[in-house]
Structure formats: C-alpha cells, structure tokens
Amino acid sequence: MLYSACMTSLFFFFASWWGIILQAIAIVHFIRRRPDTYWIFVILFLGWIGALVYIVAEVIPDASLLRTSFRAFPRHRRIHELERAILDNPSAGNYEELGLLYLDDHDFTHARACYDKAISSRSDSIDAFYRRGVAEVELGDFAAAVPDLERTFGADPDYDFHRAVGLLAHAYAETKNSEKAEALFKQATKISTSSETYYNYALFLHSKGRKDEARLWAQKILDKGPTMPGYQRRRERPWFRKAYALLARLSL
C-alpha cells in the first residue's frame, strides 16, 4: 500500500514537472514566433495538455524552418573558404559568390563591400548591381541604392520575381522622389503579391497622410494569411506582425 502511494506521488511529481517544461517550451516558441493570439490562452489555461496541443500544431511544423538554420553551417564554412581564396584569386566571380553568402547571412556591410569589388573589375553583371542595391536598402543607404536598382530595373523590369521594382519604389520613397515612388508602387502591386512591397507601399502612403489607403494595403498583407499553406504562413509572420503594428499606428 505504501509502495503504491509512493509510486503515485512520484508519477504526479514528474508529470507536473514535465507539464511545466512543456508549457515553458510552448510559451518561449509563442513569444518568438507570434502565432495566433488564442494559442497563449490554450497554453496557459489548459496546462500541459494545451501546451502539448500547441507543440503538435505549431512547434513541430516549424521544425521545417530549422533547415535554414542548419544551412548556416556550410554557408559559414564556404564564406571562410572564399575569404582565403580571394587572397590568391580576387576575381569578380569569387567576390559575387561571397557577397551573396554575406547577404544570406544578413551581413550587409560585407556584402556591399564584396559587390563593390566585383563591379570594379566587371561591370556587366546586372545581378551584382541588384544585390548591392539590396544590401544598400538593408543598410538604409537609399541614395546609393537608387542607381543600382535603376540599372537593374532598366535591364529587366521583372528582375527577381518583381522584387527589384518594389525595392526601387521603396528607395524612391525614402529619397523623397514621391512621384516616381508612387508610379512604381502602382506598377509593382499590379504584378506582385509580395508582402514586402505591400508593406513598403503602406508606409509610403502613411507618410503622405493617406491613412485609409495605407490601412487598405496593410490589411491586404493580413488577408493573405487564411489562404496560405501553413509553412508559408509561418514564413510570413514577420510581415504579419509589421502589418498589425502599422494598423495600430494608423488607428491612433
């Protein structure tokens, strides 16, 4: 009898600790990934059962996104290889490849420097100008990004699945070239459903005091969510959060 009572107590002790661990995992994931708000109530009020349901519904599917993190290791190894190779062979091709790896690693300063070197020795690569423009946009140097993106857009208006035109419109907006910005945003949003383009257009409209139009384009980002497959919706969450934040500002 005593043995049975001890085993029962141990079971509930370990079960309670596992429940706390499951809830902690679920809450940390919720804070980092920001899925639908109702999940936090499921986690908190249903205890370990709610946490387990959340983990099955949200955490496990997110595991597919970890492949991006795992790819960072070979990317870093390749970066080190190219950094050594460039000492002996500073070719435009090596600098372009290294620049692209830096872009993927969100090291925009080094990416820009690599494309500077590549373009200085070979100026016929549209991709080099485009990728340098992307790095410049990420660094907030929109004045420098404009000529690079103009060159890309002039050579191929649909470059990078219409992202080039959207970024050029954004660069125009940030350099106070409102007429060109609006014309290109209208062109871009006719052919692209990119959340990045929609969001930048909404920011532009907000800066012009056109709150109703800005609200419309921010809402378009959120309206895409219900029809997206789960993996894509998880990738779009940063844009959903930005759209929610912009709508909150527009409501003030």
Image: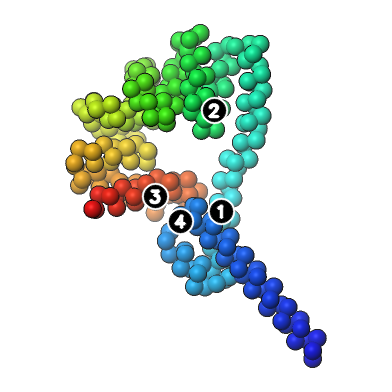
Mark 4 secondary-structure assignment: loop
Residue hosting label 2: 102
Disc 3 or 1, which lies upstream in sequence? 1
Question: Tag 2 or tag 4, which sits nearer the N-term?
Answer: 4
Q: Which mark is residue 61?
A: 1
Horizontal side of 123 relative to 172 (left or right) equals right
- On the picture, is 122 further left or further right than 165? right
Secondary structure at badge 3 equals helix
**Amino acid marked by disc 3:** Arg
Q: Nearer the viewer, mark 4 or mark 2?
A: 2
Give the Cα distance between marks 4 and 2.
29 Å
Task: For mark 1, give the secondary structure.
Answer: helix
Mark toward the viewer: 3 or 1: 3
Q: What residue does disc 4 label? A: 35
Rendered location of residue 24, percent (x, y): 57, 63
In this figure, which residue is indicated by the disc labeled 3?
241
Locate residue 97, reporting x and y percent.
Answer: 56, 21
> In the picture provided, is 176 more to the left or to the right than 240?
left
Answer yes or no: is residue 124 visible: yes
